[in-house]
Amino acid sequence: MRSQSAFSSFPDLYTPRLHLRQLRPSDAADMFAFLSDEQVTRYFGLETFNDIEEARQRIRTINASFRSQAALRWGISRREDDTLIGTCGYIYWKWRHRHAAVGYELARPFWRQGIMQETLTAVLEFGYTRMNLHRVEALVMPENTPSSALLQKLGFHSEGLLRDYGFWSGEFHNLTVYSLLRHEWQNGNG
């Protein structure tokens, strides 16, 4: 059975430092700031933004994907001032098979502060409890060691290398597939 309740209204999530919320048109300048940073997009699988209109379009696309029940991606904002500092969420949701892939990016000034671990913990909790997921995957470029380390810290297991699986910036990229099963998450977080 499809977990329609996950899409009845956009689910706000709160962590000690963060508010995970629906993206708004007013977030375009903040999104453009981090998605125009080549260090942020280097491993993201998305061309580096050159114009703020690209951020506006991405916000529209993400929100349309939620409305069509195809994906669920939160804006990551700081609770203290509601500034957008990244996004995170489920893409490639295959509801019949009860699995989805998770994707994320974070503005460089907020790297190595535990923010993405805090974010992913809340997103995984939502996925397993509200979306009824059994499996969550993440695809990571092998050179992106901070992301791989984060996933492993959260209990994800490497399943192998997908050769030339991604294509962006005019070239093919290898991706390592990681997965976390529901019972593994429950044993590690229950």
Image: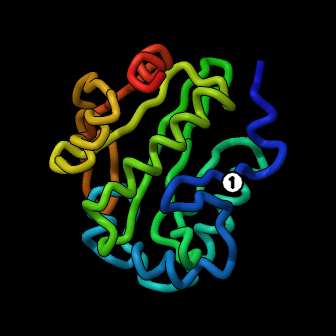
Q: Left or right: where does residue 93 sit relative to residue 181?
A: right
Residue 171 image-quadrant placement: bottom left
Does the image show residue 26? Answer: yes
The x and y percentages for residue 15 are 53, 53
Give the number of marks.
Answer: 1
Residue at the disc numbered 1: 12
Q: Left or right: where does residue 91 sit relative to residue 12?
A: left
The x and y percentages for residue 179 are 38, 26
46 relative to 147, above or below? below
The residue drawn where x is 27% and y is 39% is: 175
Does the image show residue 55? Answer: no
Q: Amino acid at mark 1?
A: Asp
Q: Left or right: where does residue 54 sit relative to residue 178?
A: right
Q: Residue furthest right?
A: 8
Where, quadrant-wise, is the N terminus in this rendering? top right
> For the residue labelled by badge 1, is the local secondary structure a helix, a strand or a loop?
loop
The residue drawn where x is 59% and y is 33% is: 127
The residue drawn where x is 33% and y is 65% is: 41
